[in-house]
Amino acid sequence: MSAPETINLLIKARWIVPVIPENKIFEDCALAIDKGVILALLPQEEAEKRYAPAQTLNLGNHVLIPGLVNAHGHAGMSLLRGYADDIPLMQWLNDHIWPAEGQWVSDQMVRDGTELAMAEMIRSGTTCFSDMYFFPEQAAQAAQQAHMRAQINFPILDFPTAWGSGPEDYLHKGLALHDDFRASPLVRIGFGPHAPYTVSDEPLEKIAVLSQELDAPVHIHLHETAQEIADSEQQYGKRPSVRLLELGLMSPLTQCVHMTQVNDTDLALLEQTGAHVIHCPQSNLKLASGFCPVQKLIDAGINVALGTDGAASNNDLDMFSEMQSAALLAKAVSGQADALNAHRALRMATLDGAKALGLEETTGSLEVGKAADITAVDLSALDMQPLYNPVSQLVYTNCGHRISHVWVGGKALMLSRQLQTLNERELIGKARWWRKQIGR
Ligand SMILES: [Zn+2]
């Protein structure tokens, strides 16, 4: 028998749900990790014979899953959590959020808000997030420093904000940022045109050309409300989706956030272009925006990822409660109790998110050769008992506060609920300081 192979880390767990192979739960197995990559998923006895790990972790009451992918948010906005509630989208934006942002958004606000958001995301099992907010260079640096995987989308709007004077300025700054992070293993820079109703044709056309040239993603709020469709039909004589298609903006690089309004034309258009949909059920519910027909999209072969949206419209960044909402809402909207079953909901929050962000070769499942982006959930507590099926527990019992360990690329971001790359106490202090400044 050959000598055991030296590796960095062996994680033994009661259950492992790798997402691929689909619908599979491994019991009493282990993940072997070396140089940040998954080497093997194998029975614990075999792992002990085959490997000499520098470190072994025994998680006897836990399930290991791929780190969750939060495919849409505005991390900097976590400092506006609970700032304005119970108001419909356009009134919420026009009368509350945009004026507050006009007054308070700065590089420091975005840095502190993003770190607060990342700490919350790590604590609830998220390892990768897609973000759209002002001062994206702050979010990109913060993600890299905290060792989270991220797609940072720089905003583009017709009007000036604290970050820029108009479309040309936003594009100029964003392209420089794209250049700065070209070689980053963790952070990818994308285009973030806010929405069809805040960006006119000319900059959208430019974005279409540049994103193809750079092979960079385009992240856009689309078909969030029925009003958006009605306004577009009046102003442009067409639906926003058709307008984007004609401007060359619908492709596999495009991530359409929300899509609560989907007719047969939209369905065919998404299917033919390979654009992705990002579903944000709790934000849509809270702002009374509408219901995304998730099961219908999935049945048509369209990739649907999951996102929390910003903390100002959710009001948390917990992907487990988002998964639960998505699974429940899909059943209500389709009238089918088997719509978005538990395994499928978990896949939507992991692999399908990675796919939407173009990261399916790197993350989203616990497969050999992929990055060791792993979340461990402790299922020993009273509210997890009795346990017949760990995947049922993951999706339907709201267990985001039961996350114990989180790794990205084999590096620990949380061990036994202690953050390793961010300072929890310091962040609470900063959030309280901002609360005093922003007032209400
Ligand atoms: Zn959003």
Image: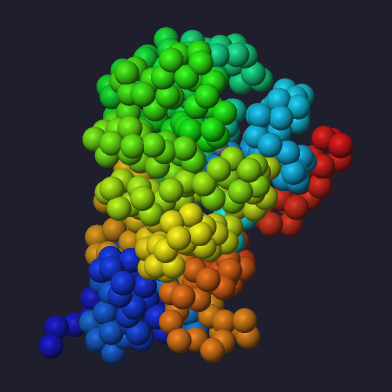
Q: Relative to 114, is 168 on the left or the right?
A: left
Compared with 63, 71 (above or below) is: above
> Which of the pair 391/88 is nearer the observer?
88
> Which of the pair 410/260 is nearer the observer?
260
Task: Determine which quarter of the picture holds residue 390.
Answer: bottom left
> Which of the pair 376/38 is nearer the observer?
376
Task: Determine which quarter of the picture holds residue 364.
Answer: bottom left
- Which percent across, then down, holds residue 39? 26, 68
Compared with 375, 88 (above or below) is: above
Determine the residue positioned at 33% across, 66% down.
19
From where the camera sits, is residue 298 visible? yes
Q: Relative to 427, is 380 on the left or the right?
A: left
- Which percent across, then down, holds residue 371? 33, 57
- Which percent across, then down, holds residue 121? 57, 55
Q: Relative to 339, is 377 on the left or the right?
A: right
| Quadrant that contains the N terminus | bottom left
- Which percent across, then down, holds residue 437? 84, 35
Determine the residue positioned at 40% across, 80% down.
15
Ligand 1 is found in the corner quadrant, namely top right
The number of discs equals 0
| Quadrant that contains the C terminus | top right
> Which of the pair 34/140 is nearer the observer?
140
Compared with 186, 368 (above or below) is: below
Determine the residue positioned at 24% across, 60% down.
369
Determine the residue positioned at 81% across, 47% down.
432
From where the camera sits, is residue 409 visible? no
Task: Determine which quarter of the picture holds residue 23.
Answer: bottom left
From this viewpoint, which residue is outermost toward the front? 335
